[in-house]
Image (spheres, rainbow, N blue to C red):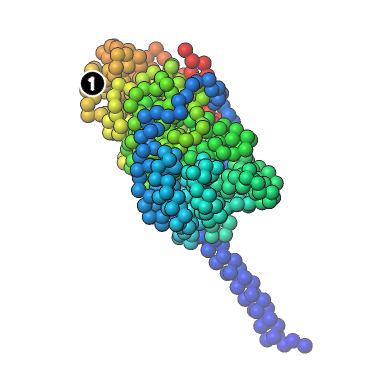
Amino acid sequence: METSTEVTNRKNSRTNRRWFILLIGVILLIVLAVLGRMAVYHVGATPFSHVPLESGNIEVPTARTLEWQDRSETTDRLLEHWAKHSLGEWKTDGKVGAPRALMGRFLLKRDLEAANAYLLSVTPWGKAGSTWERHPEGDYDFTLAGLTPILFLFGDQPDVLYPKTREHLLKVLLPLEGGEPLVMVPRTLGLVRDTENHLLMTEGSRYLKNRWLALHGSQRPVHDNVANSLEAWLLNLLEELRTAGLYEFNSIPYEGYTLTAVLNLEAFGSEAVQQAARDLLDQLNWNYALGSLGFRRFPPFRRQPKHADDTGLTGDRHAALIKSWVSLLPSAPGNIEVTESHHVGLWACWSPYRLPDKVAQWILEKPNEYYVQIGHGSRSSPEIYSGGPGYLLTAGGVYRRTRSLLVARPITLILDDDDATDLSQVLHLSGPGDDYRQWNNTGVWRDFAVTGGPVSIPQNWFPDAKGKTWKVYRRGKDQCVAVHSSTHLGVVHLTRSSNPQAVLEAVEKANSDNDALRHSFHQPGGSRIDYDTGASCNRWVIERIDGMPVDRRFDAWPRLQGEGVNETK
C-alpha cells in the first residue's frame, strides 16, 4: 500500500511530465513560428492561397489578325547584346547572365565551339527553390528556366547544340524530372509556400524536360506529364494565376522571371498548357496596355520593398518584352530601344507568342478616354488607371503592413507631350510625409486624383493661370491640369480645354469653399466626388460619387472592371 509521501510524489511526477510536454510544445511552436518568419523575411514568400476573383466587366482581348515580322532592329540589338556578352564564371553568372549569353550565341549560330565547350564544362551550381538562411544554395531554377529553351530550340540541331552537349544538358544541368512538384520553400518544414516565379521556373522546367524526353522516345511513366499528374498540377496553377491574378503583381524584379517562365510553357508545352499559358500572358499584357503610356508606367507593386526608392518610369521588367514585341509590327514606331532588363527582353527574340491585336493597339495609342480598376484580392492593393489619348493617371496603391510585401507609390500623371523617364519629371502626389508605409494613394477617379499630401510639379512646368488656391497648367493643344496643393491635401483635375483661365475660373467657382475641399470636389459641369484622404488601408479613398456610395472594399473588387474599354471610338 502506497504511503502518502509516495502518492504525493507520483502526482508531482505526473504534473511535471505534463508541464514538460507543454513546455516542449510551446518551444516547438515558437521554433516553427520563428522559422516561418525567417523564411518569409528572407524569401519574400508568405502563406497565401489563390482565391478566384470575379472577372469584372472588361474582357481580355484574344483576337489575332495582325501581321508580325520575325525580327526587328530592336530584337537584333538584343541578340547582339547577348551574343557578345561574356559567358563569365558559372558559379557567379550561371543564374542569369551565362544562360542568356549562351542563348544569344546559339540563336545567332556564333562561337558554337566555345558555347558547347562551356556547357560541357559546368555542373549545377545550386538547387531549385528560394534561397534563404537555411537554404543558401537555392535559386538554381533561374538557371533551369534559362537552359530549357536552349534544349527545345536546338536539341534537334546537332550542328548547333552538339549531341554530347545535349546529353550533358539533359542528364546533368537539367536534373529535375518526374511528377512531384517542389511547392514549399526548401527546409521550412513545409510551412512556407514558394513564390510564383520559383514555382513556374522550377516546375515549368521539370515539366518541359519530361516532355522533351517523352517526345524523344521515353516510355517511362515518370516522363509522362499526364500519367504523373504534373500537367494537371501545372494547369491548375496557371488557372489560379489567371483567375486570381498574380500575388507578385508588378513585382520588381520577379515579374520578368514569371513572364519568361510562362513564355517557356507557351512555346513548348502541350496544346492544353500552351493555351493556358497564352491566356495568362494575354491577361498580363492587357493589364500592361491599360496601365502604361509610351512604354512608361509607375504602378504599385508587390516585392521587393528594397525597390521602393526606384523612381524610373521605364524600369518595369515587363516593358522589355512589350517593346520587343511591338517592334515586330510593320507599323511600329522607329527606334524602339530596350534600355533595361535585356535579360527579359531576349525571350521576345525567339518566343512564338505575339500580342493580341487590341493589346498591341492600346499599347501604341489609347483610342479614347477610359477608367479601370484592377483588383488583386484579399489583403492587397488595387491598381487604378484613368487615361485617354495622350495621358495616363496612375494610382499609387496602398501599404498593408510588413508581411503584405506591398509598396505604395506616388500617384502619377504621365503625358505624351514630354519624354519624362523619371518620377521627378512628371506631376505626382506622394501622400503625407516621405514614408510610403503611411500612404493610401488609391484616390483616383475619372480624370481626378486626391491624396493627403502636396502635389509635386516638374521643374519645367509653369502655371498658365493662377488663383488663390489653384494653378492651371496647359499641356499640349487641349489638355489642362488644375492643381490644388497644400501640406495635407493635394487635388488634381484634368480637363480637355485650350483655355487655362477659363478652367481656373470654372474650378474655383465650383469649389469656392476651401474647407469643403478637404473632403469633396466638384468637377465643373460634372460629378461631385467625396473622399477621405485618411482612409484606412483596406478602403478606397473615394467615398461617394454624386452622393451615391461606392464600393470601397477593394479586397473584393473584380479582376478587371471599368468603362471606356470594351467599346472604343
67 relative to 295 in the view: left or right: right
Q: Residues within 10 Å of mark 1 (few under 14, many from 20)?
A: some
The image position of residue 348, as x and y in percent, is 45, 34
Q: Can the viewer see residue 499? A: yes
Determine which quarter of the picture holds residue 191: bottom right
Where is the N terminus found, in terms of image quarters?
A: bottom right
Determine which quarter of the picture holds residue 85: top left
Determine which quarter of the picture holds residue 412: top left
For the residue pair 484 and 513, the one nearer the viewer reads as 484
The image position of residue 102, as x and y in percent, is 42, 46
Amino acid at circle 1: Pro
Please give the residue where the numbered disc 1 appears in the rendered image. 463
Q: Secondary structure at mark 1?
A: loop
The image position of residue 107, as x and y in percent, is 44, 39
For the residue pair 184 and 507, the one nearer the viewer reads as 184
Q: Residue at x 55, y 25 (%)?
A: 62
352 relative to 21 in the view: left or right: left
Q: Is residue 368 above or below residue 104?
A: above
Q: Furthest-right residue in view?
A: 1
For the residue pair 556 and 205, the one nearer the viewer reads as 205
For the residue pair 525 and 240, the one nearer the viewer reads as 240
Q: Residue at x 31, y 40 (%)?
A: 433
Q: Can the viewer see residue 450? A: no
196 relative to 108 in the view: left or right: right
Q: Residue at x 33, y 36 (%)?
A: 339
The image position of residue 206, as x and y in percent, is 58, 48
Q: Furthest-front residue in view?
A: 159
